Image (cartoon, grey):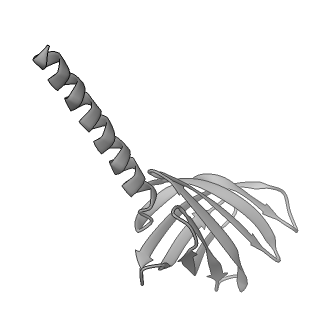
Amino acid sequence: MTARISTRLLLALLAIGLCLETEAGATSLEGVWSGSGVVNPKDGPRETVRCRLSYKQETEKVFSLTATCATHSRKVQQTGQLLKVGPTSYVGDFYNSGYDISGRVRVVVKGSAQTVTFQSAKGSGSVELRKR
């Protein structure tokens, strides 16, 4: 009976540890993320896009970002800054100097995945990224 209780206790502790690890990972934005999604330009057809984003924590709630994204027709680079507004959500601004485009970006992190949505006067889009 003692062995059975010990095994149950061990399994419960492992489950708690896994939950805590997942919650900690859910709030960790800093690092390199990559993935794909779609961009909807106002002056053209919808395109598939692949992106690689790097985040660096500047203060407790502020993160800088650099992003390189490519469609079949072009490659662009953006920079930006995000503010942590919830346990797993961030909002901010981005700027693309090559095309002189600025806009708003929203990031929601779920473990080792995140959804990034963005909008500017020239279009909108979203990408699903995984931490690298």
**Residue at x 63% of width, y 56% of height:** 127
Q: Position of residue 86 (x, y in %)?
A: 56, 67
**Among the 4 quarters of the image, the one containing residue 11:** top left
Q: Is residue 51 left or right of residue 30?
A: right
**Residue at x 41% of width, y 68% of height:** 30
Q: Is residue 46 left or right of residue 74?
A: right
Is 9 in front, or is 27?
9
**Among the 4 quarters of the image, the one containing residue 70:** bottom right
**Residue at x 50% of width, y 66% of height:** 53
Q: Is residue 123 left or right of residue 25?
A: right
Is residue 61 visible in the rendered structure shown here? yes
Q: Position of residue 14 (x, y in %)?
A: 26, 36
Relative to 72, say whether 77 is above or below: below
Q: Where the N terminus falls, by quadrant?
A: top left
**Residue at x 25% of width, y 37% of height:** 13
**Among the 4 quarters of the image, the one containing residue 25:** bottom left
Relative to 54, say whether 19 is above or below: above
Relative to 20, say whether 101 is above or below: below
Check the image and name the residue furthest to the left. Answer: 2
Is 111 in front, or is 37?
111
